[in-house]
Image (cartoon, helix red, strand yellow):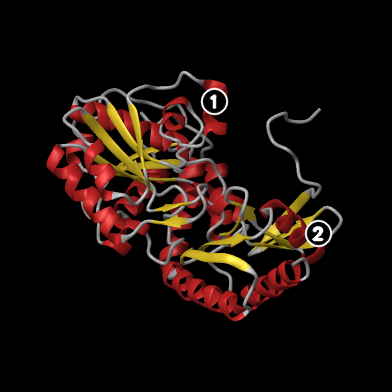
Amino acid sequence: MSGFVYNEKPIRIASGEGPYLYAEDGTEYLDFGASYAVTPVGHCHPDVVSAVQEQAAELLFVHASYPTDARDDLYAKLAAVAPEGLENVWLNNSGTEANEAALKFARSATGKSKLVAAKRGFHGRTMGSLSVTWKKKFRAPFEPLVDDVEFVTYGDEEELADAIDDDTAAVILEPVQGEGGVNPATKTFLQDARELTADAGTALIFDEVQTGLGRTGAFWACEHAGVTPDVLTTAKGLASGLPIGATLCADWIAESAGSHGSTFSGSPVVSAAAEATLSVLVEENLPEHAAEMGEYLRSELEAADLPVREVRGHGLLVGIEVKRGANRVLKELALSHGVLALPAGRSVVRLLPPLTVDTEHVDTVVSALADVLGGNE
C-alpha cells in the first residue's frame, strides 16, 4: 500500500548527509531542491541530530500549556533573530498553519474581514491559506473557500492601493514568490505595501515560509527592502525537516490575537531541532554564505550562456525560466547527472539548495544544466 496524493519519483531515498542524498542502490544525488528549502543546514547536520537524540531521550512530548526548557530556548532564539518588533512567537506545525494563524490573528486584531493577496502567490493548502493562494488548480477542487478575498497583480502598487479599504484586515505577500515562478518583489512595492497598510490600520503579513532563514542572503527576505511587517511566517527549514511553523507578531497583533491553539505546538523534540538549526545558521553565518554562493551561481549561469529566457532570484533561491517544460529538464538532471532540483510552474527550474553548498557544488549543477539544456536545443 502507498500514499495517494503525491506522484512518487522513481528514486527511493535511504540516507542523506550535507548537500547529498543517497538512494537505496547507493546512487549519490546532489540535492539542489532541499525538499522545498527544508534542509538549510544540510541533511543530518550533527548538531541537529544530537539535539534531537538528547531531547528524545529526556522528553518526547508534553502539551504547550506546560513550560519546557526546549520550547523556551526556541522562543528566545526566534525572538533574537526576528525582525525588530516581531518578538511575539506562535509555534505550530507547518507553513500553511503559520499562515492560517496569521490570517486569524489579523482578523481578530483589526476587527475586519477582507484579505488582499497577490496573483501567482502561494500560501498553503489548508482552507484559509488556500483562499489567499492564486492558482486555480490548487483551489478549484475545494471551493467554496473562505470569502472576502481580493487578488492584485504582484508588484502593482496602484492595484494594491485600490484594493485596500476600510474593511481590509490584512495584506499577505511573499517577498519572493516561490511556487509562482521565483518572482522577487521590488523594494518599492514592499515599501508601498508597508505604508498603505499602516495608513489603513491593516495588518501586513509577509509569508517567509520559503524565503526566510537566510535563503535569500539575508536572514529574512524583507530585510532587503528595509520593511518590517506586522506578522511574519516561517516554516520549512526551521527544524531541518521536522514539522514546524512559526508566526511572529507585533505587539498590537499579539495583544488582540483571539482564541487559537494547537495540540502539537512547540513539541520538545521539534523545538530542540529548531533551536539547533537556528544556532547553526547564526554561528556558521549561513545567510552571508548564501548571498555569496547565490551571486556566484547566477554569475556562472550567465557565463554559461544557457539557452534560457531568464535567471532571477535572491541568494540561493534561484529560478531559471527555460524554453521547454521544466519537468523534462528536471528528470534529465536527476537521471543523467544526479542533480535534484524543483519546478516552479511549468517553465521554471527552481534551485534552493542547502545554504552550506560551495563553489564545487555550484559548478557541478551549472555543468549539468549546460549539458541538459545545450544538448536539447
The answer, for residue 328, to whether it is visible in the render is yes
Residue sitting farthest toward the bottom? 303
Find residue 162 and report its horizontal and vertical position in percent. 23, 39
> Does residue 250 appear left or right of residue 28 in this picture?
left
What label sits on residue 140 in the rendered view?
1
Q: Amino acid at mark 1?
A: Ala
Please tell me which residue lies in front, 250 or 276: 250
Find residue 262 and report its horizontal and vertical position in percent. 42, 27
Q: Quadrant of the N terminus?
A: top right
> Does residue 18 appear left or right of residue 250 in this picture?
right
x 48%, y 69%: residue: 290
Residue sitting farthest toward the right? 25
Q: Tell me: residue 104, above or below residue 33.
A: above
The answer, for residue 267, to whether it is visible in the render is no
x 49%, y 28%: residue: 126
The residue to which callout 2 is attached is 335
Q: Amino acid at mark 2?
A: Leu
x 78%, y 30%: residue: 2
User: Which comes before the other along the chain, label 1 or label 2?
Assistant: 1
Query: Please, what secondary structure does the residue beneath circle 2 have?
Result: helix
